[in-house]
Image (cartoon, rainbow, N blue to C red):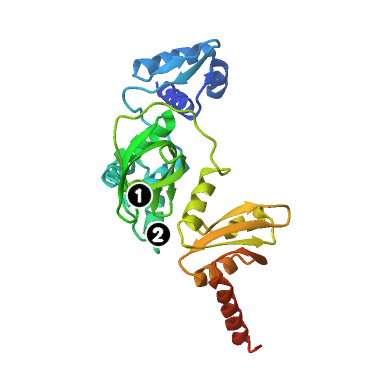
Amino acid sequence: MLETSARLLKLLSLLQAHRDWSGTDLAERLGVTARTVRRDVERLRELGYPVHALQGAPGYRLGAGAALPPLLLDDDEAVAVAVGLRTATSSSVAGIEETALRALTKLEQVLPSRLRHRVNTVQTATVRAGVAPGPQVSADTLMTIADACRRHERLRFDYTGPRGGASRRNAEPYSLVNFGRHWYLVAFDVDRDDWRTFRVDRLDPRPPAGPRFTPRDLPYDDVAAYLADRLSARAWACQATVRLHEPADAVAGRVWPGMGAVEAVDSTSCLLHLGAETATDLVWMITSVQADFTLVSGPPELAGAFRRQARRCLDALGER
């Protein structure tokens, strides 16, 4: 009986870990015959697990049931889930903290002592520093937007701009992005006939969703690069472009998120587009990349800011 129970748990674990299994593969993994696999599958069905037979070939798939079945996690997976739940208790998603805490409490009750010790060790040794709390967003709002993105349905919402102006938007949602302390929606604004980014905490969806649409091509290679460009340059009055004398792949790791957008040019150079509040801020941002560069465009005061920084450095070495 113990052997049969252990085999059922192993079978359930295999079905949870992989979408489709052939009966032969399951028999080999379990060290039993295909007939025994069929009997064990029937036992799981009797226990309420929705194990479906694959069409066209002998095999099995674990479907979504009316109730969540117990998850079988190995040690590393259990620790990863527990640490993630602890992090979620200070999430920027409103209303999720209590839910995450309840889930964490249930998980820790069934964790072996050795794993509870590992989780507590990580938690007690970790300090969150340098991260100011961002505005919280509703979990329902995130789900509404995510569902519209998945189904390619237009999204209607009220939006409050950074200066307080309110407007009604009709957009084709592309993706949700968690960037720094904020959540953003990248979408094509139908009324303005252009791509836009929206802070989710300033957004209030107006159900129901609109008609379905055919997804458009994003103006950048990926949504993260597009958002970085919008946040790092276009949002600032003081903008500049420099040509870095290194390929884009070489400098990408030195340009932090929100600082600027890197545009590949050739095998020896790339363009960096960035923005800031002042020309002085632009100088330290550009020089922090630690690459030789040529100024392509920028405000008139940027040249003077570079000269002042150069004189300051030479003075520090006593070479002027």
**Residue drawn at point x = 45 percent, y = 66 percent:** 277
Give the vertical position of 51 relative to 185 (above or below): above
Q: Picture coordinates of residue 26 (x, y %)?
A: 53, 20
Q: Earlier in the sequence, mark 1 or mark 2?
A: 1
Amino acid residing under circle 2: Thr
Amino acid residing under circle 1: Arg
Residue toward you, 43 or 175: 175
Instruction: Look at the numbered disc 2 and give the secondary structure of its residue.
Output: loop
Give the vertical position of 36 relative to 287 (above or below): above
Q: Picture coordinates of residue 93 (x, y %)?
A: 32, 46
Quarter of the image containing the N terminus? top left
**Residue drawn at point x = 49 percent, y = 17 percent:** 60
Q: Which mark is residue 63?
A: none
* Pointer 2 residue: 126
Q: Residue 86 carries which label?
A: 1
Left or right, 282 with reference to 185 = right
Q: Is residue 15 visible?
A: yes
